[in-house]
Amino acid sequence: MATSISAKGCVGSSFYGSWGTSIVGEDYNMLKSSVSSQVRIGRGKGVRLQPMMKNVNEGKGIFAPIVVITRNIVGKKRFNQIRGKAIALHSQVITEFCKSIGADGKQRQGLIRLAKKNGEWLGFLA
């Protein structure tokens, strides 16, 4: 497809169709109604739904009931602030530990990921 810039500063091409009628017109409404809101991925596989940012172990783990009760008492906004501060503090402790033993950034990142996984498993992220 050949593309050129005209004297007006507009980009020209060999395409002579109209985008307006093909995307916004009747064709669009027909296409929209014929396509489902879920998209099939791969052969013979199910429909992939929207990803959710949620803990897969929510409600599980030995500390989950305590976490849920605390969140209900304190309130979700304040609870998330406290949890964020605790996670940041724990990450700082891990960073200081890695500095003291001479671990590099990749190992530090791995330890932080492991701490998150353990927190999910124990129910701290319920």
Image: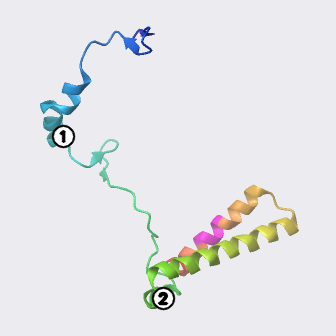
104 to the left or right of 120: right
Dominant secondary structure (helix, strand or loop) of the stretch shown in magenta: helix
- Residue pointed to by mark 1: 32
Q: Based on the displayed image, in which of its 4 quarters is residue 41 positioned?
A: top left
Write down the residue under mark 2. 74
Residues in magenta, as a range: 113-117
- Residue lying at 69% horizontally and 75% vertically, measured from the top left: 90
Q: Which of the pair 51/7 is nearer the observer?
A: 7
Q: Position of residue 116 (x, y in %)?
A: 60, 70
Please give the name of the residue rendered at 34% of the width and 9% of the height, measured from the top-left corner.
Answer: 14
**Pointers 1 and 2 in contact (C-beta within 8 Å):** no
Going by the numbered disc 1, the residue's amino acid type is Lys
Residue 10 in picture, x, y percent from top left? 41, 16
Within 10 Å of disc 2 (Cα), the crowding (few <14, some 14-19, many 20+) is few
Pair 1/2: label in front: 2
Rendering coords of residue 61 (x, y %): 50, 82
Quarter of the figure that contains the N terminus: top left
Q: Is residue 39 above or below residue 71?
A: above
2 and 33: which is toward the camera:
2
Left or right, residue 61 beside residue 41: right
Farthest front residue in view: 8
Foreground residue among 122 and 74 = 74
Q: Which residue is depicted at the point 58% across and 70% down? A: 117
Looking at the rendered structure, the kind of residue marked 2 is: Val
State the CA–CA distance, disc 1 to disc 2: 45 Å
In the rendering, which numbered label is found on residue 99? none
User: Pointer 1: residues within 10 angstroms few (<14), some, or many (20+)?
Assistant: few
User: In this rendering, is residue 98 above or below 61?
Assistant: above
